[in-house]
Image (cartoon, helix red, strand yellow):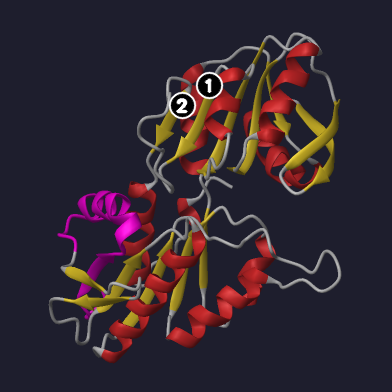
Amino acid sequence: MAIHKLKIFACRESRPMAEKIAKAYGCELGNSSVLEFSDGEFQPAYNESIRGCTVFIVQSTFPPAENLMELLLMIDAARRASAYKVIAVMPYFGWARQDRKDRPRVSIGAKLVANLLCAAGVDRIMTMDLHADQIQGFFDVPVDHIYASGIFVPYIKSLNIEDLSFAAPDMGGAKRVNAYSQYLNAPMIISHKQREKANVVGSMTAIGEVEGRNIIILDDMIDTAGTITKAADMLMERGAKSVRAAATHAVLSGPAYDRINASALSEVIVTDTIPLKQGEDLSKFTVLSVADIFADVMERVHNYKEISSRFIF
C-alpha cells in the first residue's frame, strides 16, 4: 500500500470532472485558487499543505492554450510545495492531432506539449483515447493511456441493436473500429474521405456492406462534426437502417451542434472529458461519465497495482 497521502486538485475548466472523480474515489477535492490579474495573467495556488503527497491535477486542455498554461503552473506550484509525486490527469489531451510533421515547416505540437509538461516537473501523465498512440513515446515519464471502450462497450450492448456494424469515419480510425468489431462480433465499414483543407471534407465513400445495417461510427473526437455528419448522411443514402456516432471527446467547435442536429445521426454517444455547451440542443446526445474509470486507475497507480486488467481492449 502507498504510504503517501493522495490529494486531487482541479484546474478551473475541469472542475466538474474533477469533482466527479473525487466523489468516485471517495475523497474531497483539494482546495486551490487562481489569482487573476487585469491583463489576463493568472497565478494558481494550493490553499492547503501538499508536502509529501501524491498530487493528481485534473485538466483537459480545451480550448488548449490557456488551460495548458494553467496546468503547467499548477504542476510547477506542486513541485515547489514539496509534493512527493505530481500526476497530470488529462482526460482530453489537446494538440494531439499535431503528432507528426505532415507538411513542410510546421511544428509537432504534441511533442512540444510533452516537453513542456516534463519541464514543469510532472512525474506521470494519465489521459484517455489519444488521437495517435505514438504520442505516449513523446514523454520521458510514464503515460497511462486509458480507453473509453470500458464504458462504450457496455452501453452499446445495452442497446441490443440488431444487424449492427461499426464504421470508421476515415482510414485512420480503422484500428479502433476493428477492435470493436472483433470484440462484439460485428462487421466493419471504412469511410474513405478526401479533405479540401483542414476541417473541410470533400468527397466520401464507404468500403463494406452498408445496406440494411444499423451502424455506429466510432472516433476519438468530434470537432466541427463535418466528417462524422457527412459520413452519416452518406451511409443513410447507401441504405443503412440507422446511424449513430460514438466519440470520446466532444470538442464540438464552430457549427458542430447545428451540423449534428441537422444530420441523419439518430444518437451521438460521448463522454464527459469535455463538457457539452449549455444552451445548445442536446436532444441527440448521450453522455457517459469516465469518472469511475479515472478514479479506479488513480487508486491502482497510487497503490502500485497493475492497471491492464481494467481495460476491455
Residue at 14% x, 76% y: name it: 47
Residue 58, above or below 80: above
Q: Is residue 244 left or right of residue 22?
A: right
The image shows residue 36 at horizontal and vertical percentages of 26, 71
**Label 2 amino acid?**
Phe
Q: Is residue 125 left or right of residue 212?
A: left
Q: Quadrant of residue 80?
A: bottom left
The image shows residue 119 at horizontal and vertical percentages of 49, 87
Which secondary structure, mark 1?
Answer: strand
Residue 106, above or below 13: below
Q: Are marks 2 and 1 in contact (CB under 8 Å)?
A: yes
* Residue 21 is inside the magenta segment: yes
Residue at 86% x, 71% y: name it: 104
Does the rendering let one see residue 98?
Answer: yes
- Residue pointed to by mark 1: 267
Give the residues in magenta.
1-29
* Residue 9 is inside the magenta segment: yes
Q: Is residue 308 left or right of residue 193?
A: left
The image shows residue 141 at horizontal and vertical percentages of 52, 80
Between 208 and 46, the residue placed more toward the observer is: 46
Between 129 and 112, the residue placed more toward the observer is: 112
Does the rendering let one see residue 303?
Answer: no
Between 105 and 88, the residue placed more toward the observer is: 105
- Residue pointed to by mark 2: 285
